[in-house]
Image (tube, rainbow, N blue to C red):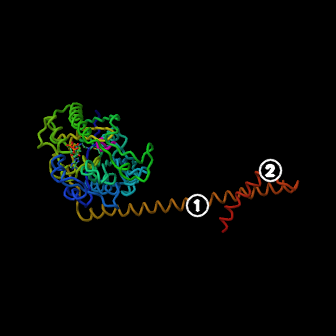
Amino acid sequence: MNDRYAAITGWGMYVPERVMTNLELSTMVDTSDEWIRSRTGIETRHIADVREATSDLATRAAWEALHRADVNPDDLDLIIVATCSPDYHIPSTASQVQDHLGASRAGAFDLNAACSGFVYALSMASQAIMSGGASKALVIGAETLSRWLDWGQRDTCVLFGDGAGAVVLEASDRPSGLLSYVLGSDGSGAELLILRNGGSRQPPRGMMPPEGSLYMNGKEVYRFATRVMGKAAREVMDRAGLTADDISLFIPHQANLRIIESAARHLGIPMERVFVNVNKYGNTSAASIPIALCEAADSGRMQPGDNVCIVGFGAGLTWAAATLRWAPPEAAPDTSLPRRLMRWSRYPLARVKSLIHRAERKIDGFEDELERRRQLVERARRNGHHTGGAAGSNGHSPNGHAAASVSKVEEPEKAVTK
Ligand code: ACO
């Protein structure tokens, strides 16, 4: 192991304002608060407004994380957004976030490993920093899975919520950040948790439920999750040379309280050392671990020097686990008013910068088009001159092609001179 580490220096989260309770759900589908609480531990979840897309949630979480780390978006080398509910198939949500932040130097891409996505992304970004390929990175888990739910399907719609969590990673020589990681996949379980419509196998056809909504075989996913969580956590601790006793806080993917309890039992970690917030947010997929990480940091559940284990599982099927050394910066960020104003002013400025880039692109495009037309007209004149001479000598156009090409290029000239 080299002596360059990827320290977590900032963290932030955002959940939409709208809270949906179990009681409200029980007026929409045949379910009850008692059933949902006893089977999943979920009490409420947050649902994105129709005007909020995944990149909006991700950007809000990213702002918080950047402020906490006191990092200027322009200094970021890399932005990874872990999501399975992107704004669009093309372009990536990460590019939208990069633009919203005004992170002009950063490379940006999305990573889809469903609920395991954040741990995958954190491992990749940490590796980029530890190898010297990047110095500062932003890793976000963000989802609006509520958009892909069939609100008439009680076995799935009660489970999920929307939200985003983000961390800033910075190169450091202090032992901190990622200690070990394990990534896994078993694609033979693809059918167990799947959104069939909208990809190349089944192109979008109106995206209406049930074809356009998330399908899940809850029992099978439950069985898979209880098996894989403990196994992946054990493996990643072994790789870091740690035992369960060395782990101060276990942060599992927040899908279901029973799955979390089963994993903790398997590992021999008492529930006091397990972070749980599934009751408030439901399953926010790739956002669940970073949101939990933020709440654990803000509530003092992680102290400098603590070893933390994070484990995710999800569609794919996929799983991922990592051990981290929690060592946030010793100095608290400067929260004085001028400093805060300076930080917040970056984002309206990023918007303006983005609008200017768009306008410049339009002007460039217009200039290129004018130049193209000018060249076509020029070529037409030359051809016309050449053709006119030949035709004059024998009274006919030498070939149909020349005549056709002249008549074709006449149109742009008209357009230009109009
Ligand atoms: N309200 C009331 N009854 C319900 C509901 C509901 N919301 N949903 C299902 N039921 C009924 C079922 O129809 C079934 O009725 P039946 O016996 O008459 O057929 C009964 O409750 C029991 O259903 P089970 O499936 O046995 O319930 P179970 O105890 O297994 O809990 C659950 C279901 C909560 C979905 C569980 O299987 C689970 O948590 N699975 C894992 C899900 C998960 O973690 N998914 C996320 C993966 S992450 C990602 O990548 C997105």
Q: Please name the amino acid that badge 1 sits on.
A: Glu
- Mark 2 closeness class: few <14, some 14–19, many ≥20 residues within 10 Å: few
Q: Residue at x 28, y 47 (%)?
A: 285
Where on the picture, by quarter, is residue 33?
A: bottom left
- What SS does tag 2 mark? loop
Return the mark for residue 399: 2
Q: Residue at x 75, y 56 (%)?
A: 382
Q: Residue at x 45, y 44 (%)?
A: 200
Instruction: Tell me the quarter of the image containing the N terminus.
Output: top left
Q: Was residue 118 drawn as part of the magenta stretch in this picture?
A: yes
Depth check: 187 or 167 in front?
187
Depth check: 406 or 212 in front?
212
- What SS does tag 1 mark? helix
Displayed-image quarter of ligand 1: top left
Where on the picture, by quarter, is residue 237?
A: top left
Main secondary structure of the magenta stretch: helix
Return the mark for residue 250: none
**Do we see residue 341 in this rendering?**
yes
Q: Please name the amino acid that badge 2 sits on.
A: Asn
Report the magenta residues as a range: 113-119
For the view shown, which residue lies furthest in the bottom direction?
Answer: 418
Instruction: Tell me the quarter of the image containing the C terminus.
Output: bottom right
* Marks 2, 1: nearer the viewer: 2
Q: Identify the residue under disc 1.
A: 367
Q: Position of residue 62 (x, y in %)?
A: 30, 54
